[in-house]
Image (cartoon, grey):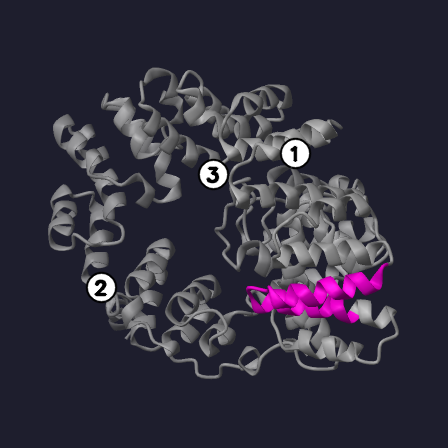
Amino acid sequence: MFLLLFLIFPFLVYAQLPPEYILLINYMEKRDALIGYRILKDYPDAVFKDDLRLFLAQDELKAGKTQSASRLLMDINPRNLREDLRGEYVKLWKDLGLDPKVGFLRSPVLFREFIPKIQLSSEEALSAGEELFRRRYYREVVSLLEGMDFQRVCYMLGMSLRSLRENESAFEVFQRCEDDRARVELAIMQYERGQRAEVEVTLSSIRDRNLLSDALFRLGRLNLHRGSFQEAINYLVRMEPSYRRDFNLGLSYYAIGDYAKALENFINSTRNAQSRDEVSAGNFWAYKSALLLGREDAGEYLIKASNGAGFYHAVASSLLGLPVASRAMRVVMEDESFPKTAKVIKAIWEAGFPEYARLEALKRLRDISSSDIIALSRLDPHLAVKLAVRKYGYGSFVYNAVAFPKPYRGVVGKASEKYSIDVALIYAVMRQESLFDPYAVSVANARGLMQLIDSTAQYVARREGIKIRNIYDPETNILLGTAYLRYLLDRWNGDIVKAIASYNAGPARVSGWVQHEDQYLFIETIPLRETRDYVKRVLYNYYVYSEILK
């Protein structure tokens, strides 16, 4: 009987596997090139085809077949390679002596070491520089663009130098640059240096009205961050009417105690709002202003805020005693069966190919049903949310049904009990940091479910006596992230807003910001937009999880 089960088990495992994956398993076990080439011929659209070409190229090089290896390598799109294989791709490229310029243009990030060895046109340099800049390789951008046609590359060159904190060099570049975008940056730098008269000259030289408005907005925000609210008003009133102008004018007037003008501008902001989130924000701050003016209609603005979306919708709904989470978010899925397409994705995952399972699901999006997505949320919550957004959109019933999952409940409960952190807060941070992807890696090299950079992980591990064998391990990552949250809450005496801001921007940076007693004003005057948005999203998640975990 045992022998019969042993013989049947592989068949059951492979029953749902597409044939190309069965062949891939055979190839990986035997490293038989004939099997590999057969897959490329019979399944040219396989999601793993570029990884397979790399494996075959390595095998061909070992067999002394350099021409075959080169052909295979030239057919690879490096952007489709698994993250852990990209270094091997570069090594093989160099071993085969292939053209460094061709490699660099295919992937400027992977082949950035070739920059000193290649000659590029201005168009090629700019295109590569944009990709390197997005990935924060600023030193490489400077190396790439120096010596190019200055007026074509000066904006990106200056931005890279500023990102490297080489401010004097950046200032000199922006002074010489005729690009209006560089004029905006020059005005900001002049203001930071106290050169008020020069700022006005630079502003008058900006030809693009939208960019001029951007410059005035940034100068206004710069003063908001510093607590110089009247100076903020002086710049913001010069902008063209818009939501961001009116909303930030409202904040400035509110901060100096002119609640009548604050209310007027917040009401105007709702008329210029471009999203339900903006409608909620404008109405919530109108409520706060009207309340301080003693107006009887203050509550009407709160009701309007609750009918929108986002962070202020959640705050307003909570104040009114209304539910924040939609009914779909509270649905408990009891059906344990997997629909047809979900079974295929699950089989690929369980065969040891989680990355390919995700790619396969996206490839089969047309065949994916709502039942598939809900079933897959138990296997991979990250994938389920992505599928729901692409197939049905944000706010759809399917999206709401999978958008706030509760994975790793045992580990999260253990971490919550050990560090006295609300389970809802752990999930709120985890959702914003990684969207429940245990393999997530940010451009800053933060890793895992709670997105920890190495220095933070090592510090917390030493402090708490946690051994790091694998930073991507969900239990290790969740424990480290929760311990860090506890540390930040203690540092800020339980102030959850500042703790969340510190999780994103670092406690030292948060300490240097203006510490408003009004928590909402503190949030809105956070200098970094990324952190400002991050705090709102985590708090929104916290409201939702607090409800659905009841």
Distance between mark 2 and mark 3 Cα atoms: 37 Å
Q: Which mark is residue 188?
A: 1
Horizontal and vertical percent for residue 17? Answer: 25, 65
First reached walking from the N terminus: tag 1 or tag 3? 3
Q: Is residue 243 above or below residue 179?
A: below
Q: Is residue 27 magenta?
A: no
Q: Is residue 537 left or right of residue 361?
A: right
Three-letter residue code for mark 1: Ile
Q: Secondary structure at mark 3?
A: helix
Q: Quadrant of the N terminus?
A: bottom left
- The residue singled out by tag 3 in the image is 134
Q: Quadrant of residue 414?
A: bottom right
Three-letter residue code for mark 2: Pro
Q: For label 1, count other residues whose C-alpha is less than 10 Å away and answer few (under 14), some (14-19) or many (20+).
A: many
The answer to whether residue 479 is visible is no
Which of the two marks, 1 or 3, is nearer to us in this view?
1
The magenta region covers 258-287
Q: Is residue 15 above or below residue 55?
A: below
What residue is shown at x 24% (from left), y 53% (from top)? 25
